[in-house]
Amino acid sequence: MPRYYEDKPEGGACAGVKEDLGACLLQSACVLQEGKSPRQCLKEGYCRALQYSFFECKRSMRWMPDQDSEEEKDIDNIMLNVR
């Protein structure tokens, strides 16, 4: 079951999902019973849903300068004029 880490600011916005992914891999049968590394188990398809969630979280954090909304540009202009 996923856990949420709202009280842990370090690590960025996706830190909770990343920590859940690591815990899932460490508790998987691949690591515990087969003795493989978490990286190898991830490549074999274990914890796929959390891996996808982590990827989507990281992807959503990307900032594209050409995708600024008009409101953000207006706010930027206001802030420049205040100085």
Image (cartoon, rainbow, N blue to C red):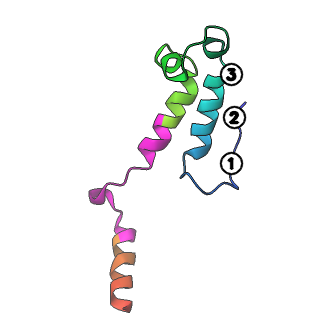
Depicted 80 relative to depicted 70: above or below = below
Which amino acid, mark 2?
A: Pro
- Measured as percent of width and height from the top left, residue 65 is found at 29, 59
> How far apart are labels 2 and 1 at the CA level?
10 Å
In terms of image quadrants, where is residue 35?
top right
Segment colored magenta: 55-72
Dominant SS type (magenta): helix
Sequence order check, earlier mark of 3 and 2: 2
Relative depth, front residue between 28 and 77: 28
Q: Secondary structure at mark 3?
A: loop
Which amino acid, mark 1?
A: Tyr
> How far apart are labels 3 and 2 at the CA level?
13 Å
Residue tagged 3: 27
The disc placed on residue 2 is 2
- Measured as percent of width and height from the top left, residue 2 is found at 69, 34
Residue tagged 1: 5
Q: Is residue 34 left or right of residue 61?
A: right
Residue 66 colored in magenta in the image = yes
Residue at 65%, 17% (x, y): give it: 28
Badge 3 density bin: few <14, some 14–19, many ≥20, Cα 10 Å: few
> How far apart are labels 1 and 3 at the CA level?
19 Å
Q: Secondary structure at mark 1?
A: loop
Sequence order check, earlier mark of 1 and 3: 1
Q: Secondary structure at mark 2?
A: loop
